[in-house]
Amino acid sequence: MEIELLEIRDFLAHHPPFDALPEGELDDLPRHMEVRYLRRGGDFPPTGADGRWLHVVRSGAIELRDGNGRLCEKLGEGSLYSGDCQLADVDGPCPGVAAEDALLYLLPCERLEALRARVPEFDRHFSASVRERLQFALQRQQGGVGGDPSYMMAPVERLLKKQPVTASAGATIREVARLMTEEKVSSVVIMDGGALAGIVTDRDIRARCVAEGLDAALPVTAVMTREPHTIEHQSPVSEALLTMTRLRVNHLPVVERERLVGVLTSSDLAHHQSTSSPYIATQVRKAETVDDLVAASRRLPELMVQLAASSATALHIGEAVSTITDAITGRLLEMAEHDHGPPPVPYAWLAGGSQARREQSSHSDQDNALLLADDYRPGEHAGYFEELARRVTAGLDACGFYYCPGDAMASNPQWRQPVASWRRYFDNWIHRPEPKSLMLASIFFDLRVVHGDRDLFAPLHQHVLEETRKNRIFIAYMVSNALHHRPPLGFFRTFVLVHDGEHDDTLDIKHRGVVPITDIARVYALSEGLAAVNTTERLAAAGQSGALSSEGCDNLTDALEFIASLRIQHQARQIRRAQPTDNFMDPKRLSTLERDHLKDAFKVIQSIQETLANRYQAGRFG
């Protein structure tokens, strides 16, 4: 396929409804499309395109206006204009102008109709009502891979940014306009006593007052929308989106039992969507500079807050955040290769630690390494990979994934080595274990390829598992190391709290709760030769292999989810308060039931640790 057609195909593949097309249809589609360039101020639909077309906006912006010059709709990247094709829900053509230079893809209506006939999922996008189309889109988003169920199910009140700005029904248009300017809002709710009488927006003042030449001294009731539709504060975002789409409004008053509590705007919805995993991933994919990636990464804390508020599991949240980190890492590598040329030999960028396990919270330190093909020659190739590693680790640091305090990063030449050197590293760690190797085990025995040649890592990983599985002395050392992280449970099942001056009377929920389970799962994976890296998957594999009892597997998995969820909720509260996140949780914030469950979770960890110690006689090496 020609480069130009491939670019069109790739663009369509990432935008609905074309993303619902089978690969064959998608590959064939660009050959039937025309490309038009529209200068700013140019008429839309563009002249000179004979026939009937579906218009797809590739870039730029189009403003559609009715016969009175009022803005009907604004089209941006990925938007469709189907007026020529006379589809359902189209009231008639609403021409416009290019608000900025625009690039358009044009698909003949006949080709569109043929696609609809052949592909039911594609056809449903153009079904008889806006409501049906949106419901289908919501089903796909909530049920699709990587979708965030929290986006559409979150209550409307969570999107409100400030208290509603109100004015009395006796206020003048000028007074309300001045109030909008002072409060920096785009709407004011008009009250008659304690009752909601109407709403006026900046668009109302422009279209109904300025454009019509009305006297600004007239009462605001002359231009307001009377008895506006409202929505309850606990209604889901999906309902608000459907309502605003059906009514074609950009402002929706939010009430709690008829009491006004805020105004939801289309901008609020757009901002909320912009912190979903698919949106952030799209921003990362489009990034051209490190600054673009930094802007995308800033959304990660709010993403974690939203997922936590939606009752998403800790497993889901860790996967969502790690997926974004993977995308940022991959884009940094692509940008570096673009600037410095293709790599002189194949390589694999390896993530370690929590990123490798897909268990990251919003921002953490980075652990990574470079695995190079064995035909790597230091004298010829070292400079390229040194610069590659430097750029990527610096970019990750700028994005909030700060440098590893122990320098376990690809920018350290010790961790930027060919396959043969890495094999020697692992053989030394396994057959001659010492304190340093045990410290590195938590990073480099949890590795995953993020970018590059995956075939480089697979044989090395298999070799490591074969060596650890048959070396009981190494496993005994690993168990002894794992027992250093004991759950904070004292006599009579009371909590053992931190007393270090800075975090007095708190629980270190990560190092005394999450890490012990991570260590246990790693021991089982290495002792049984299990390829899984994620902690939950390791526990499941250990249960299936018989190394861990079914009851032990279930209890430890539940304990991990409960403890990790408490940690995420703790950090989400800190993010909402604009505080730095940490792992030190005040047990007094827990309910009696939560404290009891936490003690049970710690007891499960203690029991499994005792089982491991007895099995491998770890005390000999402690």
Image: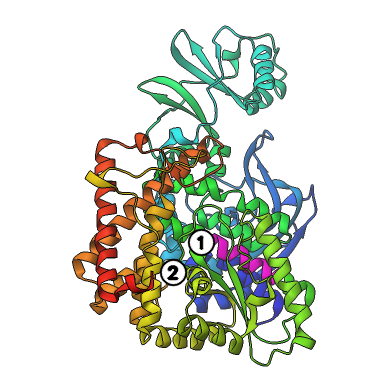
Q: Which residues are magenta?
A: 324-335
C-alpha span from label 1 to label 2:
40 Å
83 lies left or right of 616? right
What kind of element bears circle 1?
A: helix
Magenta stretch: dominant secondary structure = helix
User: What's the residue at 25%, 57% (across, down)?
Assistant: 604
Assess whether residue 331 is covered by the magenta stretch. yes
Q: Which is more toward the observer, 323 or 180? A: 323
Residue tagged by mark 2? 117
Residue tagged by mark 1? 322
Residue 133 in sight? no
Residue 572: image location, x then y, percent: 47, 43
Mark 1 is surrounded, within 10 Å at the Cα level, by few (under 14), some (14 to 19) or many (20 or more) other residues, namely many
What kind of element bears circle 2?
A: helix
Q: Mark 1 against mark 2, which lies toward the viewer?
A: 1
Residue 491: image location, x then y, percent: 25, 46
**Sequence-earlier tag: 1 or 2:** 2
Assess whether residue 412 is covered by the magenta stretch. no
Residue 592 in sight? yes
Residue 290: image location, x then y, percent: 72, 59
